Amino acid sequence: MGKRGRPPVLDDGKRREILAILSTGCSQAMAAEYVGCSVSTIQRTVERDPLFAESLGKARNNAELGLVRNIRNAANNEKYWRAAAWALERFFPNKYHTGGGPHVISAEQLAQVLTQFAHMIVEQVPVERYRKNIIKGLEAMVRNLGQTIAEEAARKNLAAQQEIVADGPK
């Protein structure tokens, strides 16, 4: 009899099923439900087994690559030009994204909001030392935000370029 409270272990068959489900683009929650375990069981298995963790990452990447490849193939046909437009907006948002509607805020807009917020705080905080600390913290947030956005854009751009190179001319 196993130790009390010990988490269940995923056997090889369940692991293969999880990887197959994830490679189609389904969520980890859906894979867990399909094999009859919890998401935390999958996560604990990932933490204990580096090979399974690597396989899980590859399965997710394969799903993403398959979807991007489908979009690229559709975009090669002029009839489906919207697929190309969609891909450009997502892979190169700084160049091609048109705004995204009322729920999207640009980095510049967020920086403006944080600046206004900083001014409001400065006006309300009577101790100069506290005001300076608050301003320093908000300035650091804005810098980090800019850096995070730049890194994300560079990563997406690199991934898109790698996909283009991998597919090669058709």
Image (cartoon, rainbow, N blue to C red):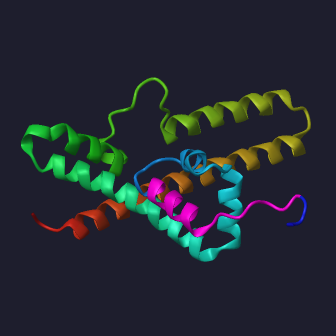
Q: Residue furthest bottom?
A: 51
Horizontal side, residue 154 vs residue 67: left or right: right
Horizontal side, residue 48 vs residue 94: left or right: right
Q: Is 141 above or below relative to 99?
A: below
Residue 54, given in percent of the width and then of the height, sits at: 54, 72
The boundaries of the magenta stretch are 5-22
Residue 14 magenta:
yes
Magenta stretch prevailing secondary structure = helix
Residue 56, given in percent of the width and then of the height, sits at: 53, 64
- Residue at 65% x, 30% y is 116
Quadrant in the picture for residue 148:
bottom right
Foreground: 59 or 37?
37
Can you say which quadrant of the picture contains the N terminus?
bottom right
- Residue at 88% x, 43% y is 130
Horizontal side, residue 130 vs residue 89: left or right: right
Residue 11, given in percent of the width and then of the height, sits at: 62, 66
> How many discs mark residues in the rendered view?
0
Foreground: 95 or 76?
76
Can you say which quadrant of the picture contains the C terminus?
bottom left
Residue 97, given in percent of the width and then of the height, sits at: 33, 39
- Residue at 58% x, 71% y is 52
Quadrant in the picture for residue 111:
top right
Q: Which residue lies furthest to the top in this view?
A: 102
Residue 108 magenta:
no
